[in-house]
Amino acid sequence: MSAATAVGAAPTLSPDAAALDDTTRAALRAYLQALGDDEMLLGHRDSEWTGLGPILEEDIAFSSMAQDELGHAQVWYGVLHQHFGAPTPDAIAFLRDAPDWRNAQLVELPRGDYAFSLVRQYLFDVAEAIRYGALAESPWPALAEAAAKLRQEEKYHLLHGRAYVERLGRANADSRLRLQRALDDLFPYALGLFEAPDGESALVARGLVPPSAALRAAWLAAVVPFLQASELSPPVVPDGADGWRPTVASIEGGRRGTHTEHLAVLLAAMQGLYRSDPAAVW
Amino acid sequence: MTTLSDEAQLHAFEARIARGDKVEPGDWMPDRYRQQLTRLIQQHANSELMGALPEGQWIPYAPGFKRKMALIAKVQDEVGHAQLLYMAAETLGKPRVEMIEELINGTSKYSNVFNYPCETWADIAMVGWLIDGAAIVNQTIMQTGSYGPYGRALKRITYEEAFHLKQGYDLVVTLATGTRAQRDMCQEAFNRWWWPTMMFFGPPDRQSVHTEVLQRWGVKPKTNDEQRQIWLQKFVPKIEELGLDIPDKGLHRDPDTGDYVITQPDWDEFFRVINGDGPMNRERLALRRLIYEEGSWLRTALEKRDLLPRAA
């Protein structure tokens, strides 16, 4: 973890969220919601490859990642349920309308072709690894413990993503072009992962979470050299000694509940059966 | 430069099998054994891969975390089984890509049950319980067969199928004991899947063409009728316990043997579906073909051993 993303200067807090002041509680709740919603929707999108993968090995790999991401969503929704009086993880995921979701728009986009899904997964996994690395040192134990556990799984995702992105970036002109197109489409949305959730500054001030701007800088420092070494061109220019400045605007709004039409369509499918009788046991 | 006559080789081969020895990839085997076994394992691999389609399409709609994750894991296992079985078949000399091409051009078969539609969520329950249950009966028997790599693959597969069966049963119980709408959905799906399940084990022994020599060579240790009977003994009591109504009104037990006697399903339909004219054959194969074609750039890129040099 770089110094820029460091949290944890404050001493460990009581695990009891009720002991936090109202502003901090509300901000933490919004933050956890964003974490869970990102994972939930990416897991859903990944699972759209299950049984339909372009080769058996990648069919299996995306199914594993789908299960991991859904499992992570369950963990964050579980923290919301346990500490913030939110409904059960099932109710959080299957009974909420699009405007109430706080995910970055990146993860709600349709799965696209394999190159699109691969590049999205890679860009997301690097961001998660950096974020969870920082959150693992948060003084609020529920957040730190969950982040420490989940980052272990993201490691395997990253190994997979890096291997395939590099291989396909450098295999032939066709595969390189497909990855480049995906990267062009995805990069502005990936920047949207670093849109700060509501009330983040209160959490940053207390040392509970890293500032999103610092995460974004660390993310750029990680993905840009790797993509370039993979013969891909991320839309950035050098900025300062070891920084990068995107030449495209970040697509934001997701953390405030503004979404593409794809989210409502996704939710109609994902929630339809569950909502047909929410009181029933499925 | 054979040292033994073909007849002596065959004699020695059959003696090994009679002793219960396993045949391994490098061993001498009759051509017909190699062909039959390749056909069998390849069809089994195809079935796992095709089975992933009807179930996989329900993943986005699965109600709740538990069902969603279980269904992803199940379909993932099936794709993994396909991979394992194609590898087992490759030990007999046929490359995977050739087998997948034979699948999508329709020259290699797969289990007929996957040519039936999964119309509701309850169909997923039925496939998971009835069909995975039938597959376990079949695979538990087949794993005692004479070809080593196939038997070992099946051991691992049946171990995982046992989880699928548990999930499938749990799902059926949930629906069968749920709301009125869920119970109706469950019964209707059961009605749809009863006859395809009866057909799953293949035509009655008196109509089956391959059985005798396959049994002698330990390729197929039990007949279709024997396998079907094992399934009936296991499942009918459970079906009755759940209060599901069996659509075969003629089903009864033989008072002397205790065996279940079924009304024969429509075997003409069975052969029609095998020959490509089932409710979902075209659609399933077209989807598999589309996936294969769309993956062509990826396979080409991954085959390449030396990567392009880096610019800098």
Image: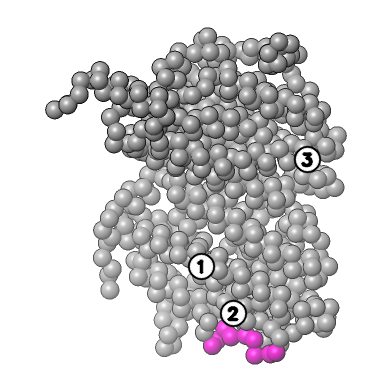
Residue placed most toward the observer, B17 or A121: B17
A269 displayed left or right of B106 = right
Q: Which residue is mark 3?
A: B174
Specify the amino acid type for callout 1: Lys
State the CA–CA distance, disc 1 to disc 2: 15 Å
Relative to B114, residue A225 above or below: below
Co-location on one chain, circles 1 and 3: no
Magenta-tinted stretch? A3-11
Label 1 crowd (10 A; few <14 / some 14-19 / many >=20): some
Residue A273 image-quadrant placement: top right
State the CA–CA distance, disc 3 to disc 2: 42 Å
Per the rendering, the mark at residue A155 is: 1
Residue B12 image-quadrant placement: top left
Relative to B227, residue A230 above or below: below
Most common secondary structure along the magenta stretch: loop
Tag in front: 1 or 2: 1
- SS for tag 2? helix
Q: Position of residue B136 (x, y in %)?
A: 58, 33
Q: Which residue is mark 2?
A: A134
